[in-house]
Amino acid sequence: MSTHQLLPSSPATLPWRGLIHRYRDFLPVSENTPIVSLNEGNTPLVPCCHLADALRTDVEVFVKYEGLNPTGSFKDRGMTMAVSKALEEGSRAVMCASTGNTSASAAAYAARAGMTCAVLIPSGKNVALGKLAQASIAGAKVIRIAGNFDKALEMVKQLTERYPITLVNSLNPYRIEGQKTGSFEIVEQLGGEPPDLHCIPVGNAGNITAYWKGYKELHERGLTDRRPVMWGFQAEGAAPIVHGKPVPEPETIATAIRIGNPASWKQAEAARDESHGLIDMVTDGEITEAYRMLASREGIFCEPASAASVAGLLKMNKLGRLEELRKRLGKKTLRIACVLTGHGLKDPSYATECAEPPVEVPTDMAAVLECLGLEP
Ligand code: F0G
């Protein structure tokens, strides 16, 4: 696959110094911005042949493996911008509500910047253990409320309006600015062209907003000749945009997108409509199937919420929507990019629940051979 440079400096020849350095011309930073970076971005766009085969139609499918960012999710793209700008503006503290990944990222970037970080997380098992561990070890003040994410976000919004604390949820416009670089990388990795179709999980709806903004900016600057169709996917039990009304008690095994009243609702609808795309939903069963398939056929371990992008693609294909899109675009081969937003290691307990447990045998060669079905 060829790599096309939107900018003269080449990541292949220069050491990668993070996405603000790379895409400075596209971002609201100046010489005075103290850049807080963990060298985020530059994640691989991996071709997935088994997935393409499973679709049984003429496609090239790639996944943008965002789990390979420094804290294991796409949130780092937004957080390098949000924390750098907070520091530039003299802020000493950041805060967010989170289903886990935003808190892990905020805690790490705040630690690096020498800032205080507080996070408000939903009750019970709704934050995967890995994410909680990340925020805690980075020294964030982790506060768990009895309510869900939507309630936590409401409280954090009020709090950051009243106190000198910077909100680093995706309502912070710098988060969106940083996250839009995901689309820049995809275009570069596809040889200077956008994909025909971009599939993405939707929770609080910041990321679909950011990717669409990125694709639009490249097009407006004349760097690409078109924009992709955006397909966003919510979990069935947490699909307010699909139903057209908030879901008071969202439910899904994909805890990262267990959100009933997304902050960027309108922007997500704009991305859908302007791109002639769709926002649909996938069941927990469909998410789990895609999650297992990615790990067991492609060797790519993402967290359950991330697999919603692939689950949605598989579902839409079954409904004939890929063929419809191919006809509409007049393309022989459709090029598809799916964002895998977070690493599978964030939530090892779901993986172990889904997979075969280890076989216990005595420390004995005969027992091991028997287990492998081999002759002694
Ligand atoms: N995938 C993962 C792994 C996430 O953590 C999130 C959001 C999404 C998808 C959805 O992205 O909210 O921009 O539509 N996680 C947030 C958090 C809510 O607190 O970590 P979105």
Image (cartoon, rainbow, N blue to C red):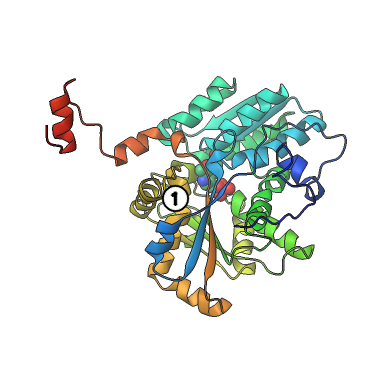
User: Which SS class for mark 1?
Assistant: helix
- Mark 1: which amino acid? Ala
Q: Nearer the viewer, residue 196 or 138?
A: 196
Q: Can I make out residue 94 in this image?
A: yes
Q: Residue furthest front?
A: 376
Q: Can I make out residue 145 in this image?
A: no
Percent from the top left, x then y, of residue 2? Answer: 64, 57
Position of 345 compared to 79: left or right? Answer: left
Seen in the picture, residue 185 relative to 101 is either above or below; the reply is below
Indicate the quadrant where residue 353 lies. Answer: top left
Percent from the top left, x then y, of residue 321? Answer: 45, 72
| Quarter holding ligand 1 | top right
Percent from the top left, x then y, of residue 43? Answer: 60, 44
Residue at image coords 71%, 21%: 114
The residue tagged 1 is 307
Residue at image coords 67%, 45%: 171
Indicate the quadrant where residue 213 lies. Answer: bottom right
Seen in the picture, residue 43 relative to 330 is either above or below; the reply is above
**Local crowd size for mark 1, using a 10 Å CA cut-off: few (<14), some (14–19), many (≥20):** many
Percent from the top left, x then y, of residue 12? Answer: 69, 44
Q: Residue furthest right?
A: 31
Q: Nearer the viewer, residue 240 or 175?
A: 175
Q: Quadrant of the C terminus?
A: top left
Q: Quadrant of the N terminus?
A: bottom right
